[in-house]
Amino acid sequence: MSAATSAGSAPSVPLVLARPSPANIPPLKSLTTQQVLDGLSAATFTTEQLVQAHLNQIARFDSELHAVLQINPNALNIARELDAELAGLDGPARKKKMRPLHGVPLLVKDNVATAEPALEATAGSLALLGAKPARQNLAVTRLRDAGCVLLGTTNCSEWANFRSRPSDSGWSARGGQTYGAYHAKQDPSGSSSGSAVAVDMGYCVLAVGTETSGSIISPATQNNIVGLKPTTGLVSRDAVVPISPQQDTLGPMTRTLADAALMLDVMMGRDEHDPKTAEIPEARLQSPLHPRLTAVEEEASLSLRIGIPRDALQGIKSAILEAFETRVVAPLRAREGVTIVDCTMPGLLRFKTLSLVEKTNYMAGEFHDALPAYLAALTANPQHIDGVKALCAFIKSTPEEEYGENEETDEKRDDSAGDTTEEEAENIVEEAVHDIGPPRRNIERLEQTQAVTRDSAAFAAAKTNAAYFAGAGGVQGALDGIKGGPDRPHGFNTHEPVDILLLPTNASAVNYFAACEGHPQVTLPLGYRDSPKVKRNDTGRLVATGPNVPYGVSAIARKYDEASLMRVCSVIEKQTRTREHAEERRLAHLRG
């Protein structure tokens, strides 16, 4: 593909349907890692056939959804090399020779460096085209060493949603606009938009996403997949375009919890190039997650205390709350050994008083320093970007970045962002596009970053708020209850400690709280919206919610306690089985 694409339009993925996909490969939209390993072990299909089938899937569907940014021209060669490792072997000898993730197709978000010369890591920005990190991210190395076939990179919200305000999730100057598969012009959420859509549509079995605040969890739930945001520092962030060293993480995006566990077991570990990984407890390094899932199936009693922050559920649609109570909470309550506890997050009161700028000043201050450090370590930097100021200047001078103030009128934005019927919403947006011409993107978030430094009062206030939201006023306070520290707000959370917190994923303030100090979180598919009402995103260009758009359920735990998440989420996944209905809910022409 060309180095730069016309902004606002999707890049053309250079693929053709080279050969028919073998009939003996299971359906790609539900294919699991275990099915891949079983098929290769039995020689039912080859890695080359499997990779070609996934390339065919991308070629068939992605001209509309724009999830994949670049295809690895080496993918089929890698597949042939993996097949050669198994040549002449069968039975136990073949199985023994296979790697843990032998032949499993993988896609990686476009802000994570790989060792493939043809693949960029640009965070969706033309400013980083040709920029070369010194090495491949270690988590990607581990996945590839375990046998994954790197198919390419996925589109993302430019600069991980830290460029424009308002913005369209899933849009980048390099990749155009990514869409979800369940509604026309569906907002895919972000910033790991392409990774989420790619997993949902069967373009890969596993995808790497990244998150600073909500960027794995939100697109995962919006696209009906499993998103696992691990404890910050459990997975190396080296060779990843940064936002906030305090909050940044990589994590698995998959169709099943078992695959997320397998993937994280491979990805996690210490890295001399990421000091945060030195904090991983030795016991956690010696405790893989995937075996825990089998153990849960054999447990007669779960012995779990689950907290539900009831004040965080205000404003969530009644249909989603009903699904949460009937399909998740009630079956868990009936399970032996499970105790359900109502808890609170008093920090929500403070959170509601903050402006969007105040909510993001902490990340802005971190980005102010983290970006120059990342850029200074590059071995090539053709655009000579050395910090936020130079980045802003580049965007302003590059037409393909669609720079300009967003010209929608407040009236049109208010109309299109509200609850309307599908037909009314389409008419509003068509009228707006006719009146104002092509969309234009500002750099308001980047300009905010220029103004916020680590020694500023704005950063100090934001840091204090983040500590409160992650601590006594939010996640840790709800988990610890009466055993919380001396800063526990009086009169709140008088319960005994709980193991995890459980709530609908679209309780977005809690996702923000969990990100503030790196608490682990999992989201699972829960259901699909049935209301005919359509709600647009802030720009009015995308459908945020509407008929068939998915929603999910989340669990949050203490740092490094991903095991508790596995225990409860394994039970939820088996009792909900939401993805079994995915195909009938997708747009008709995206089925099959």
Image (cartoon, rainbow, N blue to C red):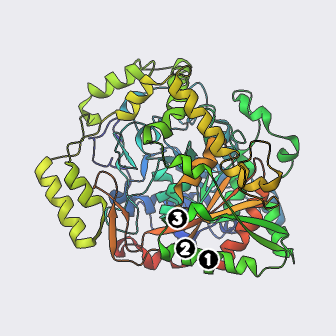
**Are the residues tagged 3 and 1 within 8 Å (C-beta)?**
no
Q: Which mark is residue 325?
A: 1
**Dividing the picture into quarters, in which one does residue 585 lie?**
bottom left
Report whether 399 appears left or right of 459: left
Q: Position of residue 443 (x, y in %)?
A: 34, 33
Q: Position of residue 538 (x, y in %)?
A: 33, 52
Q: Is residue 496 visible?
A: yes
Which residue is drawn at the image coordinates 14% and 47% (left, top)? Answer: 436
**Are the residues tagged 1 and 2 within 8 Å (C-beta)?**
yes
Q: Which mark is residue 321?
A: 2
Looking at the image, which is closer to me, 108 or 581? 581
Looking at the image, which is closer to me, 481 or 527? 481
Circle 3 packing at 10 Å, graded few (<14), some (14-19), many (20+), is few
The residue at which mark 3 appears reads as: 314
Looking at the image, which is closer to me, 348 or 565? 348
Which residue is drawn at the image coordinates 79% and 35% (left, top)? Answer: 279
Circle 2 packing at 10 Å, graded few (<14), some (14-19), many (20+), is some
Task: Look at label 3 and name its amino acid.
Answer: Gln
Q: Quadrant of the C terminus?
A: bottom left
Whole-angstrom CA distance, mark 3 to mark 2, is 10 Å
Q: Position of residue 553 (x, y in %)?
A: 60, 66
Which residue is drawn at the image coordinates 74% and 35% (left, top)? Answer: 277
